Image (tube, helix red, strand yellow):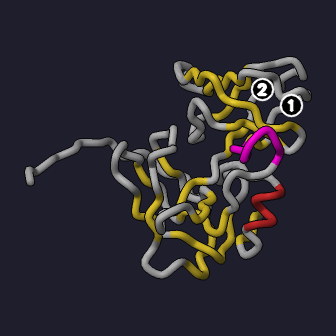
Amino acid sequence: MSLTIKRKKDNRVVKCVLHRVADIPGGVTVSVANLGGSTLFEGTPLAVGENGLFVVVKTAQIVTAATETATTYEVAKGHHFKVGDRFATDACNGQLITAIDKTDPAKDVITVGTTLGAAITAGTCAFESKGADKALKNTPVAIAGSNYDVESGDNLFVDAWVIGVVRKSNAPVVNDAILTALKNIVYV
């Protein structure tokens, strides 16, 4: 085994978890195989996956309104969508993502193969659906308690909280289905 030294510049982190009441003892291991982002943010919803691993409930905040015929959607940085995922909103069935443009430092542009079929307003929560429907692919049971860097090939050991209080304005965007599933996490 060789010694590896990594140099990084720390940035000021804006916290979203205000109160931590109960966690999963010992934490959980999150699979990074399907993550498209470089950071797992505090407050990210987590769901039980396969083989004892947990998975991220993928969400993204729409930052620019889109018409009902649009096939490109501008979303805030920090999401974990990848090409091939299903992109949906509460009003629109999930469509396959065909491309993601991450060149703009302020936002990403997600392109879907077929339009979502409804006008989308800024601030809307987009999520990963099971298929061509409006159902969450993964049902959350906890939230991540800290920020973690995602490194390809390495799973993440994460503190997962099942009871707590989260400042909604600082947390990753969630919709009503996620809020209902996380019944012991209070968003204020």
C-alpha gap between disc 1 and disc 2: 8 Å
Figure quadrant of the N terminus: bottom left
**Tag 1: residue type?**
Ile
For disc 1, the neighbor class at 10 Å (few under 14, some 14 to 19, many from 20) is many
State the residue position of label 1.
120
Q: Give the image quarter of residue 138.
A: bottom right
Q: Residue at x 45, y 64 (%)?
A: 158
State the residue position of label 2.
64
Q: Residue at x 53, y 65 (%)?
A: 145
**Magenta stretch holds residue 24:** no
Direction from residue 60 to residue 105 in the image, left or right: left
In this rendering, the answer to whether 138 lies above or below 97 is: below
In this rendering, the answer to whether 158 lies above or below 38 is: below
Q: Give the image quarter of residue 178.
A: bottom right
Extent of the magenta region: 127-134
- Tell which circle, 1 or 2, labels the residue nearer the N-terminal end: 2
Q: Residue at x 86, y 45 (%)?
A: 90
Q: Residue at x 52, y 62 (%)?
A: 50
Depth check, mark 1 against mark 2: the one in front is: 1
In this rendering, the answer to whether 125 lies above or below 99 is: below
The residue closer to the viewer here, 33 or 188, is: 33
Circle 2 SS class: loop
Number of marks present in the image shown: 2
